[in-house]
Image: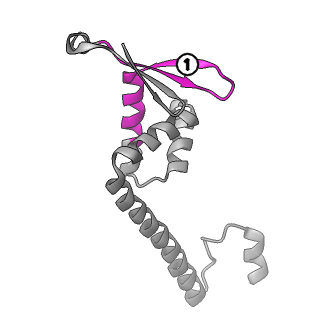
Amino acid sequence: MERERCENVDLVKPEGKDTARQGEAAIIQLEKPWERHETLSSLDIQLVQNLVERCLQLYLNQREVVHILHEQAKIEPGFTGLVWQKLEEQNPDFFQAYYARLTVKEQLVVFNQFVAQHHCILHGVPNLWNKHPQQQQQQQ
């Protein structure tokens, strides 16, 4: 078997095409900070990659993706971060455009908040975007 070292990940590749055709999955050992080794198959990696890609379709940032996958799928944040990092390395042009879209998305959210506040001021409607009800009462 051929072994590659990539940062804190050992990639173990099966030798020859016949072995790969027989369905043998590559094995990855992910080093944890506390030096505990967990063995993951290529299917595990593919699953996390697919979940990350679904989150990308929803225009979530890395922090949101890591949080959602940890909360909903019980996937370790470090592993999700590593998969994200590898996707970024393999698709730099996509991520450059993606981060630009995320910036536009954030700007649209702020703009919509300003429009809502402006509407509330013009029409004397309580500001629903205001996070703190005490501040809302003080403004009246």
- Image point (53%, 31%), residue name: 75
Q: Is residue 3 left or right of residue 63?
A: left
Q: How is the image coloured?
A: one colour
Does 99 lie within the magenta span? no
Q: Is residue 78 left or right of residue 34?
A: left
Q: Position of residue 120 (x, y in %)?
A: 58, 82
Q: Is residue 54 visible?
A: no
- Disc 1 secondary structure class: strand
Q: Position of residue 129 (x, y in %)?
A: 60, 71
Q: Position of residue 19 (x, y in %)?
A: 25, 10
- In this rendering, the count of numbered labels is 1
The residue at which mark 1 appears reads as 38
Label 1 environment density (alpha carbons within 10 Å; few <14, some 14–19, many ≥20): few
In the displayed structure, 136 sits above or below 9; it is below
Work out whether residue 43 or residue 58 is closer to the camera in this orientation and state it.
Answer: 43
Does 31 lie within the magenta span? yes
Q: Which residues are magenta?
A: 24-52
In the displayed structure, 108 sits above or below 46; it is below
- Image point (66%, 22%), residue name: 35
Image quadrant of residue 74? top right
Work out whether residue 72 or residue 80 is closer to the camera in this orientation and state it.
Answer: 80
Q: Which quadrant does the N terminus fall into?
A: top left
Work out whether residue 132 or residue 72 is closer to the camera in this orientation and state it.
Answer: 72
Q: Position of residue 23 (x, y in %)?
A: 27, 13
Q: Which quadrant does the C terminus fall into?
A: bottom right
- Image point (36%, 29%), residue name: 46
Q: Is residue 91 visible?
A: yes
Q: Is residue 93 left or right of residue 3?
A: left
Q: Amino acid at mark 1?
A: Glu
Q: Residue furthest bottom?
A: 122
- Image point (63%, 77%), residue name: 126
